[in-house]
Amino acid sequence: MKKKVAASIKIFCLVLLLAIGLAMIFNEQIKNIVIGDMTHNALKSETQSVDQAKKSKTSFDFKKVKPAGPAAVKDAWSDNTHAIGKLAIPAVKMKLPIFYGLRNENLLRGTGTMKSNEKMGQGNYALAGHHMKDPRILFSPLTKVKKGELIYLTDNKRVYQYRITVKKVVDEYQVQWIKDVPGKKLLTLVTCLTAKTGENNRIVVRGELVKIESLKKS
């Protein structure tokens, strides 16, 4: 009798563990689908100017960014903040809306500006984004970019073309990468090295401005 009870308990535990494992897998898949859908919708929606965006409350503290958990994704789903532009890296099939600031809702729908007064085509335009387990969404494709490839930004008036000159791994305290460099017109993209919670290292991708064109010519 004791052996049957022990066997039943063992089977129950195995089934429970299997159920939990499947739930975690499907939750992750659902989360990624929702994030992809939010990004797609934000890309199709109208954009706003930076001056308009500045009227809304936001944050520029990367330390306050929360992991992309189910609760955070749920909050982002109900957010209707308009983007201020778009980012594209054709070589890795990456296209994202650009939002003003590092609100969690912004980073779960696209990428966010890291400084309050930065302008496309001037200084060092710095953007941050999430590194996800799904290599196709948000800033995850940055792991595959290479030097020499092109990055495009647009504010719906002009297209800013940058060529990647630097790709490296730095620790979270090397914040000098987002500062302006005298005489340089740069773009700097920052994301975590992995999708693990608590990751301390960052991937930095930097490009130098090549040219600016009217959006109508592109």
Image (cartoon, rainbow, N blue to C red):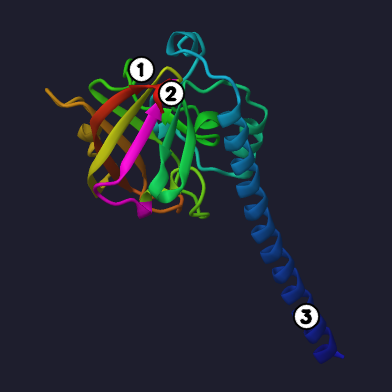
Residue to which mark 2 is pinned = 101
Residue to which mark 3 is pinned = 11
Q: Residue at x 44, y 28 (%)?
A: 102
Q: Position of residue 10 (x, y in %)?
A: 75, 81
Relative placement, left or right, of 166 versus 50 is: left
Circle 3: element type: helix
Pointer 1 or 2: first along the chain: 2
Q: Residues within 10 Å of mark 2 (few under 14, many from 20)?
A: many
Q: Which part of the image, by quadrant, shows the C terminus?
A: top left
Q: Is residue 198 visible?
A: no
Relative placement, left or right, of 138 versus 171 is: right
Q: Which part of the image, by quadrant, shows the N terminus?
A: bottom right
In this view of the protein, which residue sits in the foreground, 57 or 135? 135
Relative placement, left or right, of 31 versus 214 is: right
Pointer 2 or 3: first along the chain: 3
What is the three-letter code of the residue carrying label 2? Gly
Q: Position of residue 60 (x, y in %)?
A: 39, 24
Q: Is residue 185 above or below residue 39?
A: above
- Which quarter of the figure has residue 161? top left
Asked if marks 1 and 2 touch (Cβ < 8 Å), the reply is yes
- Residue span colored magenta: 143-155
In this view of the protein, which residue sits in the foreground, 89 or 194? 89
Instruction: State the CA–CA distance, disc 2 to disc 3.
Output: 50 Å
Mark number for residue 116? 1
Instruction: State the CA–CA distance, disc 1 to disc 2.
Output: 7 Å
- Which quarter of the figure has residue 216? top left
Q: Residue at x 64, y 31 (%)?
A: 75
